[in-house]
Image: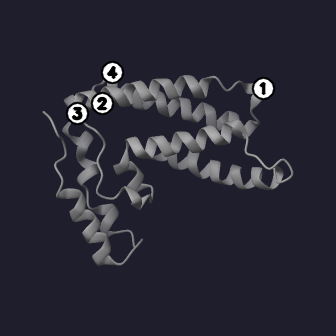
């Protein structure tokens, strides 16, 4: 999923820059670009540890809702997002956007598979490992080291789950 969202967000940033100049007369983004921006915003909010890995440090110290209800809510959200993305027809998208849509659908399918079919949150302890890995805080110089360490300790000082 990391590669997927990085590619999508990177492609969308490039596409958005292209669309900004192309749409400067129109003054608006395409419906697809608006959808992708919202999808990424919602995905980062639902998966804050992933957001941090992507450089969104406003999510430092936050965890996803790993309760059974939270896991089910995320699966439902992903299924809903899959339907929304699939509703964008080829005739509504340029070639770049078609590729983004198809890639996004594949990544959503992958997320759903690992969360629902394989049930990794309940069968694979490594599912939670990235959330407590200090790598993003100590090896990426996005801020002074003391600030990065404070962000990491803020993260690990919280309980990972609120219910068992």
Q: Residue furthest front?
A: 27
Sequence-earlier tag: 4 or 2: 2
Kindly report the distance in space between the C-alpha atoms of the residues bearing marks 2 and 3: 6 Å
Residue drawn at 40 percent across, 24 percent down: 76
Q: Mark 4 points at which residue?
A: 117
Of badges 3 and 4, the one in the foreground is 3
Q: Could you say which quadrant of the image residue 93 lies in? A: top right
Sequence-earlier tag: 1 or 3: 3
Image mark for residue 67: 3
Horizontal and vertical percent for residue 36?
59, 41
Kindly report the distance in space between the C-alpha atoms of the residues bearing marks 4 and 2: 13 Å
Image mark for residue 71: 2
Image mark for residue 107: none
Of badges 4 and 2, the one in the foreground is 2
Helix, strand or loop at mark 3: loop
Cβ atoms at labels 2 and 3 below 8 Å apart: yes
Cβ atoms at labels 1 and 3 below 8 Å apart: no
């Amino acid at each position: 999923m990391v590669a997927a969202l990085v590619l999508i967000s990177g492609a969308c940033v490039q596409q958005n820059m292209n669309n900004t100049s192309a749409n400067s007369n129109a003054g608006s983004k395409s419906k697809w670009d608006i959808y992708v921006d919202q999808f990424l915003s919602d995905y980062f909010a639902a998966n804050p540890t992933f957001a941090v890995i992507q450089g969104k440090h406003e999510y430092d110290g936050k965890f996803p809702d790993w309760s059974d209800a939270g896991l089910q809510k995320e699966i439902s959200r992903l299924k809903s997002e899959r339907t929304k993305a699939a509703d964008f027809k080829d005739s509504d998208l340029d070639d770049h956007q078609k590729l983004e849509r198809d890639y996004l659908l594949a990544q959503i399918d992958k997320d759903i598979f690992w969360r629902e079919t394989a049930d990794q949150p309940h069968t694979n302890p490594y599912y939670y490992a990235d959330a407590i890995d200090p790598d993003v805080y100590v090896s990426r110089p996005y801020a002074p080291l003391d600030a990065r360490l404070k962000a990491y300790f803020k993260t690990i000082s919280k309980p990972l789950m609120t219910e068992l």
